[in-house]
């Protein structure tokens, strides 16, 4: 469930950060007071001058957008494929929207000072609230511009849509009332320097009422938030509270809605029962609190979360409760790793057992299908549960290292390990699969074979004609110390094995790891690192190369052809790749990321620390180079 919190926090932090500490309640109007206790996701962000230097990087991105004229080129591409009459309508609509948004002071919006976001479920429908503080009359200008769009919708909808303007808690609200069958009515509003948006009018009014009554209970007054904050660094940029318990309660409303709509329909009611049973087994996160803060040229976050009581008796709890933690993560990762991920993962066997038990219980007619499934497994002597799911418990390691150069740019070598309890049986199944492949003529033509590795004892190398043309790719797999290992190159696997044996330098001893300033000691649930800047540069370079080459190749391939498909639209789209690649490359100021999750001090708890290194501004880089 952490994705709810992470995605919301990311959206806020693109524009927000914090000056004073978030944990100190302000005596003046505090936006956190506006979020009601029934939201399952609460986000608060505030401008932080420590991150102002990043505006220089984002300005370079926007300069690339303007210099490449990508927006104009995309618009021209769409226009070129439209009928003349439709072009006129599109241009007219564009001009109308542009005129409607003319009052918006976009520069003021980029100077966002403070923002809250809340989300909750009402039956099957999700509702959101946003309240943002802008300098001067930025909020009023945004309300005016969006109000013009609301007026356009009102005019187009005729009698089906109505505009209603009212005042509540000193805020001017404008609601776009949609037809009754639409379960929401978007509302925008302004109160001084505050801009309000919600998908429902009563949600906006509820938030404004709470904002004026600091003594009333708000979402951030939850004791679980205070407990978590006592164990986390001080929040400077953002605070995110994901309430899994509230979400679980509101999801009951979705089930009730399905049952209400499906009243009298036995099939619909049984589906509702199945979904209800599944949710009872899946929703194990009680809550998760994340704080964002800044240290130098680092964007940092820290998370504290707890699982619900009794989660080990639930299906998902059984999938993760008995995983073996990594006590020696540094012994897995070579110094030259460009990215890696170690994760305790989950065993799928409890979920498989639940499916094969619960579905026949609710749908007795499915027993025949499950019996047929068992017969098929017996026929081929491959049993999903016993041979596959029980062989792999879920713990995994994935490592990427720089590979040899290729005509298309840099390449990489990859190695992965997954914990395996039945190596002999898995090896037997792999050999049977290769024997079956040899019966296919097309596979035979590729000369695919399995050979014992000369360098790695107990490992086998996959040989094929096609692989020889792919930069000397030598896929290899084998079993060692309770793990199944797979790699793109024999030497890459050897490097990892040497690191585990203490015969090769570890990433933990590199300057790159030291840059994060993150101490990782004790058992680890998960740890990952990625060189984001390098990946962005490679992606941008590849887009520019492919965008330059492919249209010419396609044009040459299509010369003299008759009756073939029209490749013109595809060629036009591919021509956009070089400018897009140039824009993408500008995001390489996000240099690298390290994240680690470990058991918390309290029962059923966990903590996660994440550090993102940001490229210093040009002035700071020049000063550092001069000092060196």
Image (tube, rainbow, N blue to C red):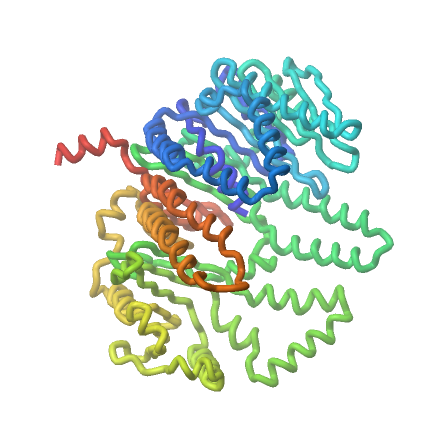
Looking at the picture, how far across and down is residue 538, in whole percent? Answer: 33, 51
Q: Is residue 171 above or below residue 238?
A: above
Q: Quadrant of residue 504?
A: bottom left
Tell which residue pokes out farthest to the right in this image. 264
The C terminus - image quarter: top left
Looking at the picture, how far across and down is residue 443, in whole percent? Answer: 44, 80
Q: Residue at x 78, y 30 (%)?
A: 160
Q: Is residue 159 above or below residue 568?
A: above
Of residues 458 and 93, the one nearer the viewer is 93
Task: Report if residue 193 is visible in the image.
Answer: yes
Looking at the picture, how far across and down is residue 356, in whole percent? Answer: 66, 69
Q: Is residue 241 above or below residue 471?
A: above
Q: Quadrant of residue 411?
A: bottom left
Looking at the picture, how far across and down is residue 372, in whole percent? Answer: 68, 79
Q: Residue at x 57, y 30 (%)?
A: 94
Q: Is residue 604 left or right of residue 580?
A: right
Task: Report if residue 206 is visible in the image.
Answer: no
Of residues 480 and 66, the one nearer the viewer is 66
Q: Residue at x 76, y 46 (%)?
A: 257
Q: Residue at x 39, y 51 (%)?
A: 547
């Amino acid at each position: 469930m952490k994705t709810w919190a992470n995605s919301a926090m990311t959206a806020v932090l693109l524009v927000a950060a914090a000056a004073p500490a978030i944990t100190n309640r302000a005596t003046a109007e505090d936006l956190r007071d506006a979020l009601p206790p029934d939201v399952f996701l609460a986000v608060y962000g505030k401008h932080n001058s420590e991150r102002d230097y990043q505006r220089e990087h984002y300005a370079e991105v926007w300069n690339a957008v303007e210099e490449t004229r990508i927006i104009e080129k995309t618009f021209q591409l769409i226009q070129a494929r439209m009928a003349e009459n439709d072009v006129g309508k599109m241009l007219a609509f564009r001009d109308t929207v542009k005129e409607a948004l003319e009052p918006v002071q976009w520069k003021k919006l980029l100077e966002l000072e403070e923002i809250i976001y809340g989300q909750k479920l009402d039956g099957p429908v999700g509702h959101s609230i946003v309240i943002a503080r802008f300098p001067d009359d930025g909020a009023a200008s945004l309300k005016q511009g969006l109000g013009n769009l609301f007026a356009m919708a009102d005019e187009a909808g005729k009698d089906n849509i109505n505009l209603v303007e009212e005042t509540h808690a000193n805020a001017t609200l404008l609601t776009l009332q949609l037809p009754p069958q639409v379960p929401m009515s978007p509302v925008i509003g302004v109160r001084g320097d505050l801009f309000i948006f919600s998908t429902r009018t009563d949600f906006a009014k509820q938030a404004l009422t709470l904002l004026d009554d600091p003594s009333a209970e708000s979402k951030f007054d939850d004791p679980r938030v205070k407990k978590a904050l006592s164990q986390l660094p001080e929040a400077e940029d953002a605070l995110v509270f994901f309430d899994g318990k509230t979400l679980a309660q509101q999801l009951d409303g979705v089930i009730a809605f399905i049952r209400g709509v499906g009243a009298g329909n036995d099939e619909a009611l049984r589906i509702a029962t199945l979904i209800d049973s599944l949710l009872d087994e899946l929703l194990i996160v009680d809550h998760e609190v994340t704080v964002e803060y800044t240290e130098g040229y680092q964007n940092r976050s820290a998370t504290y979360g707890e699982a619900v009581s009794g989660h080990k008796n639930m299906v998902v709890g059984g999938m993760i409760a008995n995983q073996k933690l990594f006590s020696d993560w540094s012994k897995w990762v070579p110094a030259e790793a460009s990215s890696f991920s170690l994760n305790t993962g989950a065993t799928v066997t409890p979920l498989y057992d639940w499916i094969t038990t619960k579905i026949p219980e609710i749908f007795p007619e499915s027993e025949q299908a499950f019996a047929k499934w068992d017969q098929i497994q017996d026929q081929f002597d491959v049993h999903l549960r016993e041979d596959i799911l029980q062989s792999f418990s879920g713990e995994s390691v994935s490592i990427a290292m720089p590979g040899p150069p290729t005509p298309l740019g840099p390449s990489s070598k990859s190695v992965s390990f997954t914990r395996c309890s039945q190596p002999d049986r898995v090896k037997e199944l792999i050999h049977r699969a290769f024997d079956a492949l040899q019966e296919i003529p097309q596979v035979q033509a590729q000369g695919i074979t399995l050979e014992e590795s000369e360098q790695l004892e107990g490992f086998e190398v996959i040989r094929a004609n096609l692989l020889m043309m792919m930069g000397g790719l030598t896929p290899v797999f084998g079993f060692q110390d309770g793990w199944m290992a797979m790699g793109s190159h024999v030497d890459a696997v050897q490097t990892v094995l040497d690191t585990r044996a203490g015969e090769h330098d570890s990433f933990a001893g590199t300057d790159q790891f030291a840059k994060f300033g993150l101490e990782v000691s004790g058992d680890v649930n998960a740890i990952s690192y990625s060189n984001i800047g390098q990946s962005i540069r490679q992606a941008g370079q590849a887009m520019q190369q492919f965008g330059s080459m492919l249209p010419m190749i396609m044009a040459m391939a299509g010369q003299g052809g008759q009756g073939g498909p029209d490749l013109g639209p595809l060629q036009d789209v591919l021509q956009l790749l070089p400018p897009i690649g140039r824009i993408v490359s500008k995001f390489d100021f996000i240099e690298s990321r390290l994240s680690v999750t470990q058991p918390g001090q309290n029962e059923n708890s966990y903590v996660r620390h994440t550090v993102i290194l940001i490229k210093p501004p040009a002035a700071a880089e020049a000063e550092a180079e001069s000092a060196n």
